Image (spheres, rainbow, N blue to C red):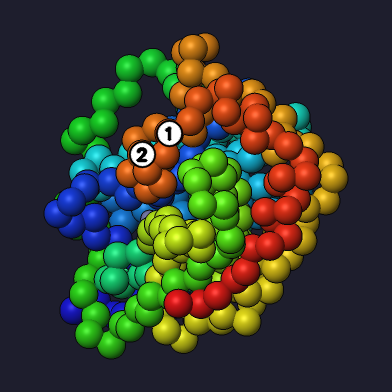
């Protein structure tokens, strides 16, 4: 029987509903630049760990640059459990995020006990299983080898055979652990809207941007894992909730709330408001790029679909400021 997490708790089981770990998004926006990066390893658990470590490195860069998810960028990390393939999809929507292109396309992660443990904690929250590892030195070596390998760009890649690369006997695996307790925490941003539907899409868009940005911060700083988002409106009280999972001993809602307040305070600054307005005005469904609010998602969650004409009307600084300054945060 393998020892329990050499580095602590750690991750993956995409049992059942999917064979890849897809990190959920809400809205897709005006795309200025897209990088699709690939790496492959022969261990699916190591691949999942490395995918999380890479995503953490990306999120650290975005956070340091004061960028907002969905307004400036969108990152999606996927690992394919049957093949050990990792894909990192990096979408950059603004000049501010495009400036990071070079650092992002050559992204490497520090390989330390702390960075490995953080990824293991995130994966525990995500999958409710732990990663166990018999040989920490071997694991670090595999991660370093993977880190030294250059990312392939899909743009220039030759045919990639994704099958028949996996080791049969790994020294790292993912297992159930009765002592593991994962808590689920839900935070809501609420506000008052007019009786009609006019501001629902804008409310959902802005609250989603805040939730997504905070989720990236809570993920790479606290080990929280974002699990779902929902919108509801009763009378004129609108609410957008975000659910997180985290290992019980890592729960730190004081810090999470501080992140929410920081992001709300930052997003109201004039330079950031003008980026939001630029994004809203840029939406188009006819230019062939998937860079607009997702119609299915808005229909399902908000019950309202709007096109570029209405988004342009909503791209109003006063209106956006009023909404942002009236959001209330509450734990549910
Ligand atoms: Zn994952």
| Residue 216 screen position, x and y as percent | 56, 57
Of the four image quadrants, the one with ligand 1 is bottom left
Does mark 2's beta carbon lie closer than 8 Å to ligand 1?
no
Q: What element does badge 1 sit on? A: loop
Residue 146 in view (yes/no): no
> In this figure, which residue is indicated by the disc labeled 2?
299
Q: Earlier in the sequence, mark 1 or mark 2?
A: 2
Q: Considering only vertical position in the picture, is 131 above or below 276?
A: below
Q: CA distance from mark 1 to mark 2?
A: 6 Å
Query: Residue at coordinates 83% horizontally, 51% vertically from top-left?
Result: 269
Give residue 322's position: percent from left, percent from top.
Answer: 73, 53
Front residue of this view, candidates 168 and 163: 163
User: Where in the figure is residue 128, as x and y percent of width and height?
Assistant: 29, 71
Local crowd size for mark 2, using a 10 Å CA cut-off: few (<14), some (14–19), many (≥20): few
Q: Which mark is residue 305?
A: 1
Identified at 38% across, 79% down, the residue is 183
Quarter holding the C terminus is bottom left
| Contact (Cβ within 8 Å) of mark 1 with mark 2 | yes
Q: Quadrant of residue 214?
A: bottom right
């Amino acid at each position: 029987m393998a020892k329990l997490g050499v580095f602590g708790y750690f991750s993956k089981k995409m049992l059942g509903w999917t064979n890849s770990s897809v990190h959920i998004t809400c809205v897709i926006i005006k795309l200025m630049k897209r990088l699709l990066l690939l790496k492959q390893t022969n261990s699916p658990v190591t691949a999942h760990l490395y995918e999380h470590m890479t995503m953490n490195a990306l999120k650290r860069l975005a956070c340091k640059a004061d960028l907002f998810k969905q307004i400036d960028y969108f990152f999606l990390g996927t690992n394919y459990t049957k093949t050990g393939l990792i894909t990192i999809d990096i979408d950059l929507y603004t000049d501010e995020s495009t400036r990071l292109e070079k650092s992002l396309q050559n992204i490497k992660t520090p390989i330390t006990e702390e960075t490995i443990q953080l990824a293991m904690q995130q994966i525990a929250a995500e999958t409710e299983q732990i990663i166990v590892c018999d040989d920490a030195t071997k694991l670090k070596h595999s991660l370093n080898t993977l880190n030294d390998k250059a990312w392939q760009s899909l743009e220039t890649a030759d045919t990639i055979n994704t099958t028949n690369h996996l080791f049969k006997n790994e020294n790292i695996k993912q297992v159930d652990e009765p002592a593991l307790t994962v808590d689920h925490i839900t935070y809501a941003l609420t506000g008052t809207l007019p009786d009609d539907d006019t501001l629902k899409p804008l409310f959902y868009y802005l609250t989603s941007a805040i939730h997504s940005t905070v989720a990236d911060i809570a993920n790479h700083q606290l080990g929280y894992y974002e699990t779902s988002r929902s919108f509801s409106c009763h009378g004129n009280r609108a609410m957008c909730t975000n659910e997180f999972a985290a290992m019980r001993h890592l729960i730190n809602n004081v810090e999470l709330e501080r992140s929410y307040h920081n992001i709300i305070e930052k997003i109201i600054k004039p330079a950031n408001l003008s980026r939001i307005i630029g994004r809203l005005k840029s939406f188009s469904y006819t230019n062939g790029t998937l860079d607009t609010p997702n119609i299915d998602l808005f229909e399902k969650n908000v019950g309202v679909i709007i096109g570029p004409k209405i988004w342009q009307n909503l791209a109003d600084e006063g209106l956006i400021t009023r909404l942002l300054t009236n959001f209330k945060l509450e734990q549910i």
